[in-house]
């Protein structure tokens, strides 16, 4: 793993002198630490992967365009978060399971006042979810189902019976994505991470609710009709972010851009 930005003495060293070893989980956690938050503050970051030609998936899943280092960073970002926010379609396609406690991050989470693992918050309008899955029936931390006030009442009741906590973040059937962030923060889940999918990320972008994008650029080409990392309607004015960190390993670029 090499740090390309911010530039340091090590960054500018000759290829033979650069730090190409595998970084420890502690080093990754330091590189991706959340910024200090005010008492009433919150921070929403996204973690996505994209190929060189802009594909966020291959055959409907992100795993084929990922790699070993990407998965280590994926786990690190989860371990730093209070809550992982994900869309219902991604839950169905990627086979989401509950977040697990990881001994490597236990002391860091305890020092930050966090529980053993992040909660998973599933954003859904139609509540078309299988509530018999372990994500709902046996998580270490109760899974949250985020929906609108007019969501199907029978499905809301089924979610509650399965042990999920239902969070209302919209006045109609769907959700207000800016309100999702606020409702989770009000429950003490202020360090937020979204893993998409593209439609949910696009909604966060459109609502100007995204504070940081952690984007892995995979050295692959997929062509075809693969989705981009963010979908939905275009914003009126492009949102500009500033680079915070760029790492490289095995041809993958691991970038972080933050709100200016």
Image (cartoon, rainbow, N blue to C red):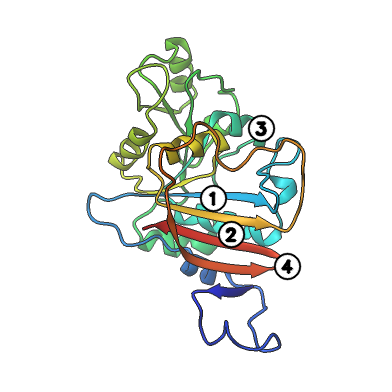
Where does residue 53 sit, x and y in percent of width and height? 70, 49
Label 4 or label 2, whichever lies nearer to me, is 4
Compare marks 3 and 4 and give the one earlier in the sequence.
Answer: 3
Label 1 or label 3, whichever lies nearer to me, is 1
Compare marks 2 and 3 and give the one earlier in the sequence.
Answer: 2
Q: How far apart are marks 1 and 2 (CA)?
A: 9 Å
Q: What element carries label 2?
A: helix
Compare marks 1 and 4 and give the one earlier in the sequence.
Answer: 1
Q: How many neighbours does mark 2 have within 10 angstroms: few (below 14), some (14-19), or many (20 or more)?
A: some
Q: Is mark 3 on a helix, strand or loop?
A: helix
Q: Is residue 73 above or below residue 167?
A: below
Where does residue 177 sit, x and y in percent of width and height? 39, 33
Q: How many neighbours does mark 4 have within 10 angstroms: few (below 14), some (14-19), or many (20 or more)?
A: few
Q: In this view, does 88 lie above or below 66?
A: above
Q: Nearer the viewer, residue 165 or 227?
A: 227
- Give the position of the N terminus as an image quadrant: bottom right
Question: Residue visible at 60% across and 34% down?
Answer: 90
Where does residue 189 sit, x and y in percent of width and height? 35, 45
Compare marks 4 and 2 and give the one earlier in the sequence.
Answer: 2
Which circle marks residue 47 in the picture?
1
Residue 19, quarter of the rendered image: bottom right
Q: Is mark 1 on a helix, strand or loop?
A: strand
Question: Residue visible at 45% across and 12% down?
Answer: 152
Q: Do the residues labelled 1 and 2 touch (CB within 8 Å)?
A: yes
Q: Which of 231 and 79 is in front in this view?
A: 231
Which residue was labeled with disc 4?
A: 250
């Amino acid at each position: 793993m090499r740090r390309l930005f911010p530039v340091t003495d090590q960054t500018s060293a000759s290829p033979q002198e650069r730090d190409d070893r595998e970084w420890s989980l502690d080093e990754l956690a330091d590189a991706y630490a959340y910024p200090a938050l005010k008492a009433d503050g919150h921070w929403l970051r996204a973690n996505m992967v994209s190929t060189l030609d802009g594909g966020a998936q291959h055959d409907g899943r992100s795993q084929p365009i990922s790699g070993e280092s990407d998965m280590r960073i994926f786990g690190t970002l989860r371990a730093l978060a209070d809550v992982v926010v994900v869309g219902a379609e991604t839950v169905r396609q990627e086979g989401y399971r509950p977040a697990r406690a990881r001994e490597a991050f236990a002391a860091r989470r305890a020092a930050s006042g966090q529980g053993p693992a992040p909660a998973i918050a599933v954003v859904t309008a139609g509540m078309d979810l299988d509530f018999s899955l372990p994500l709902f029936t046996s998580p270490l931390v109760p899974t949250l189902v985020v929906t609108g006030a007019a969501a199907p009442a029978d499905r809301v009741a089924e979610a509650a019976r399965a042990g999920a906590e239902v969070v209302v973040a919209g006045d109609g059937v769907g959700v207000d994505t800016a309100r999702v962030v606020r409702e989770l923060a009000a429950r003490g889940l202020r360090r937020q991470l979204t893993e998409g999918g593209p439609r949910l990320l696009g909604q966060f972008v459109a609502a100007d609710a995204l504070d940081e994008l952690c984007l892995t650029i995979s050295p692959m080409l997929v062509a075809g009709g693969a989705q981009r990392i963010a979908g939905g309607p275009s914003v009126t004015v492009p949102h500009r972010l500033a680079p915070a960190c760029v790492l490289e390993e095995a041809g993958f670029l691991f970038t972080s851009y933050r709100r200016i």
